[in-house]
Image (tube, rainbow, N blue to C red):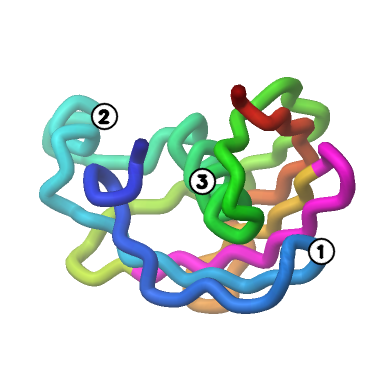
Amino acid sequence: MLEGLLYKTLSLTGNPSAAKASVVLLDDSEIYKAHFPGFPVTPGVCIVGMAVELASALTGKKLSLSEAKDIKFVTPIFPKGETRIDFDLALEDETLKAVVSEDGAVCAKMTITVKQDA
């Protein structure tokens, strides 16, 4: 889980079909020490992972990525102190749509398939 390792959830409101979440990045994370030393960037796979974890929290079910249908990384997310990232989430059946932004600027958009873990 990335919660507590890479980010901390500030808020999570709504329901699975229309939700908003805000997280703060933990800039002292071990992940940033490796990606990239001296110039940390939030890995794309971690951005996707955060969206899946937030959807899991909304549903109360353990979800995992099944298929990456369409993912666009628009701008990099750099950890700089109290970096706040916002997620607009919509989960319908097994399709999760997410728009990820920082300070109102879109950083990533994705449509992915998730599955419930046993």
Indicate whether 98 appears above or below 5: below
Indicate whether 11 appears above or below 9: below
Residue that badge 3 annotates: 53
Taking the spot 79% from the left edge, 53% from the top edge, the residue there is 91
The residue type indicated by label 1 comes to Ser
Q: How many angstroms separate mark 1 from mark 2 (CA)?
A: 33 Å
Marks 1 and 3: in contact by CB < 8 Å?
no
Q: Residue farthest to the front?
A: 118
- SS assignment for the magenta stretch, majority: strand
Label 2 Cα neighbours within 10 Å, binned few <14 / some 14-19 / many ≥20: few
Quarter of the image for the C terminus: give it.
top right
Picture quadrant where residue 106 is located: bottom right
The residue type indicated by label 3 comes to Glu
Q: Secondary structure at mark 1?
A: loop
Marks 3 and 2: in contact by CB < 8 Å?
no
Q: What numbered label is drawn on residue 17?
A: 1
Residue segment shown in magenta: 84-95
The spot of residue 42 in percent (x, y) is 37, 42
Marks 2 and 1: in contact by CB < 8 Å?
no
The answer to if 88 sits in the magenta stretch is: yes
Q: Earlier in the sequence, mark 2 or mark 3?
A: 2
Q: How many angstroms separate mark 3 from mark 1 (CA)?
A: 15 Å
Q: How many angstroms separate mark 2 from mark 3 (CA)?
A: 21 Å
Q: What numbered label is drawn on residue 35?
A: 2
Q: Earlier in the sequence, mark 3 or mark 1?
A: 1
Indicate whether 98 appears above or below 33: below
The residue type indicated by label 2 comes to His
The spot of residue 92 in percent (x, y) is 87, 51
